[in-house]
């Protein structure tokens, strides 16, 4: 068994590690998937990438193989179709511990990619919004997007710490804000990850929804003079797994991140990361931190 939980239910056999055993090493992890792009015309905010962590106090992973494959999910690209952007990509440790990419914000009249780690917000004329925690994990890896009543505004994308907000009234309100992200201190300092993107608006002079804390992109405002798509939504922040904001051109989703922390008692093991874009650091107290901002490998 290449990896197993030090507490909890079943071991995680089949994580995709290469052959060749090493002394078992217990590690903490933070795995954030790529956020989704917002929808267009106006669309819902992009859902944040899935948020999964063992730090602090969760079930550690036990690595017993020499080389671990790490995948960092890309953020969803914008304007993939006339009305919708792309879903965020999954991040993973091996092939079993997977955080799901965020769900795209719904366009007008909708998008087939609403569900994800966190769900995309419902778009203009949509009757529903994206579900979060798809596929389900425990604890949940994300939240749903905000619902959109029929009208000219759209809901915010879901975030790791909360659901996207429904939009305001049809002709006088705002697009729905994105759901908040969640702070984590696996690096030694608190960082907020996986905020949802803001929902867009169509009616003249209305205000686009704000991105959620944790890097969510803001939606563009409505046109000051006409009921038409207007402006460009902000991108979700890279390496936070944040959702993009909606607009006449939607914002792209932010890429994810994978962080592995080796506790002090086992830190004398030799670690290496590849490629060189990824980093190794030693924290106060002796814990070692492997930070992956792009896909690569961890060697023990």
Image: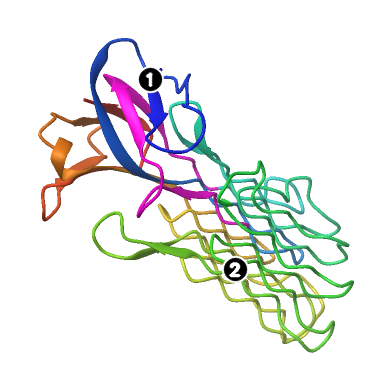
Q: Residue at x 36, y 39 (%)?
A: 294
Rendered position, 53 above or below 125: above
Q: Position of residue 64 (x, y in %)?
A: 30, 21
Q: Position of residue 293 (x, y in %)?
A: 35, 44
The quadrant in which the N terminus is found is top left
Q: Residue at x 72, y 67 (%)?
A: 146
Q: Position of residue 203 (x, y in %)?
A: 80, 81
- Span of residues in magenta: 47-75
Q: How many marks are shown on the rendered structure? A: 2
Q: Please tell me whether residue 221 belongs to the stretch shown in magenta.
A: no
- Identify residue for label 1: 2
- Identify residue for label 2: 179
Out of 267 and 289, give the one closest to the viewer.
267
Q: Quadrant of residue 80?
A: top right
Front disc: 2 or 1: 1
Rendered position, 269 above or below 59: above
Res 10 label: none
**Marks 1 and 2: in contact by CB < 8 Å?**
no
**Residue furthest top as drawn:** 19
Q: Please tell me whether residue 49 belongs to the stretch shown in magenta.
A: yes
């Amino acid at each position: 068994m290449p990896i197993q939980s030090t507490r909890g239910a079943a071991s995680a056999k089949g994580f995709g590690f290469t052959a060749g055993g090493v002394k078992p090493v217990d590690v903490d992890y933070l795995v954030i998937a790529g956020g989704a792009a917002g929808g267009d015309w106006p669309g819902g905010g992009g859902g944040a990438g899935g948020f999964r962590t063992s730090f602090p106090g969760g079930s550690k992973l036990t690595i017993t193989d020499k080389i671990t494959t790490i995948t960092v999910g890309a953020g969803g690209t914008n304007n993939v179709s006339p009305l919708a952007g792309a879903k965020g990509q999954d991040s993973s440790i091996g092939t079993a511990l997977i955080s799901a990419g965020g769900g795209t914000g719904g366009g007008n009249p909708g998008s087939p990619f609403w569900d994800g780690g966190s769900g995309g917000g419902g778009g203009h004329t949509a009757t529903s919004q994206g579900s979060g925690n798809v596929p389900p994990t425990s604890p949940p890896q994300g939240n749903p997007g905000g619902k959109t009543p029929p009208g000219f505004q759209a809901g915010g994308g879901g975030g790791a710490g909360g659901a996207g907000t429904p939009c305001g009234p049809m002709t006088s309100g705002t697009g729905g804000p994105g759901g908040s992200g969640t702070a984590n201190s696996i690096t030694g300092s608190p960082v907020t990850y996986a905020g949802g993107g803001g929902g867009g608006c169509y009616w003249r002079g209305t205000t686009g929804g704000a991105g959620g804390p944790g890097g969510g992109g803001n939606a563009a405002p409505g046109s000051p003079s006409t009921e038409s798509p207007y402006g460009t939504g902000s991108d979700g922040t890279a390496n936070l797994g944040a959702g993009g904001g909606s607009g006449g051109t939607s914002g792209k989703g932010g890429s994810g991140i994978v962080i592995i922390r080796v506790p002090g008692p086992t830190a004398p093991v030799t670690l290496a990361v590849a490629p060189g874009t990824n980093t190794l650091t030693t924290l106060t107290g002796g814990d070692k931190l492997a930070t992956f901002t792009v896909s690569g490998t961890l060697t023990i």
